Amino acid sequence: MLIVGEMKLAEVIHHDYNLVPVINRFDIPLGFGDGTIKQICAQRNVNLEFFLSILNTFHDEQYFPKDYLKSFPASLIINYLHKAHTYYLDEKIPQIKSMISKLFDLSEGNKKTLNLLSNFFNDYCKEFELHVAREEKEVYPYVLKLEEALDNSENQTMLDKDLLNYSIRTYEQDHEDVEEKLFDMKSLIIKYLPPENANNNIFEEVSYALLRELFVLEKELKEHSRIEDLILVPKVEGMEEQFKSNF
Ligand SMILES: [Fe+2]
Ligand SMILES: [Fe+2]
């Protein structure tokens, strides 16, 4: 299904519930009414074309119009990526942490695997926070500055020579796939989570819910990296070329 502006946003969510956190990133929380996507975007000052491209990209793995996505302003792409970071750090990670601690509370048996799981996730979070901090503090601000300099390029005095000292290539080279490590954690749950007392149904329920959250997070992060690696980086490479030629 290709999502288009004439569709009602509520119907799209009925069709693909996983889009809820994605539309949140555009400051459209639930309770948005019965409008079409076009109407809702107009009311809320959301770039319709960008919104549709992101929804479709997220909804259908095969849909990935690279060149089209690269045509949007970097600030729009970065705003979206930044909101996603906030969502992972402030919602997803705490949610997963609280599920792990719930498992500890419910477990009546040996906690060895739970300890392993918990240590693994804590280490993962530290790495993830560093990954995000680098993008938020170093990469995104650089891109926004570069875009500003290009927008003001008629005004030669605005050209900031410092921008030439950085290159998006450094980021491209060591931009890690943060989602890959979640695989080991899923395996740990799938293969080694100890069976609990038969009466302890809640333990099983929370384990399943945790596993589901990890699958969802993994998919989200894969999508996020895809936009960083295949849209943002090549876009910025083009901007750098243009910036150099302005000197
Ligand atoms: Fe990121
Ligand atoms: Fe990243």
Image (cartoon, rainbow, N blue to C red):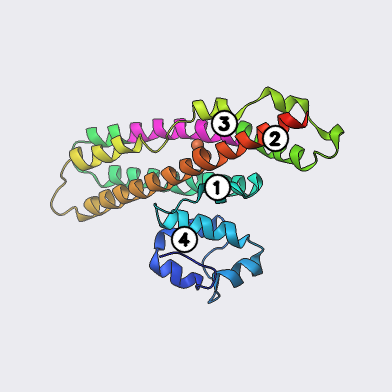
Find residue 128 and report its horizontal and vertical position in percent: 46, 34
Q: Quadrant of the N terminus?
A: bottom left
Q: N-terminal of the two: label 1 or label 2?
A: 1
Which badge, 4 or 3, is on the more N-terminal residue?
Answer: 4
Residue 247: % across, % down: 78, 28
User: Which element is circle 3 on?
Assistant: helix
Main SS, magenta residues = helix
Q: CA distance from mark 4 to mark 1?
A: 26 Å
Q: According to the image, label 4 marks what residue?
A: 20
Q: Which residues are magenta?
A: 118-136
Question: Are the residues at dot 2 and dot 4 in contact (C-beta closer than 8 Å)?
Answer: no
The answer to which quarter of the image holds residue 144 is top right
> Tags 1 and 3 in contact by the CB under 8 Å rule?
no
Say the numbered circle drawn on residue 242: 2
x, y (%) of residue 130? Answer: 51, 30
- The amino acid marked with disc number 4 is Val
Q: Residue at x 46, y 60 (%)?
A: 20
Residue pointed to by mark 3: 134
Q: Is residue 108 left or right of residue 118?
A: left
Q: Is residue 73 magenta?
A: no
Name the N-terminal-most of marks 2 and 4: 4
Amino acid on which disc 1 is placed: Asp
Q: CA distance from mark 2 to mark 4?
A: 37 Å
Marks 1 and 3, how far apart at CA: 26 Å
Marks 4, 1: nearer the viewer: 1
Instruction: Tell whether circle 4 marks a residue whose Cβ is less than 8 angstroms from ligand 1.
Output: no
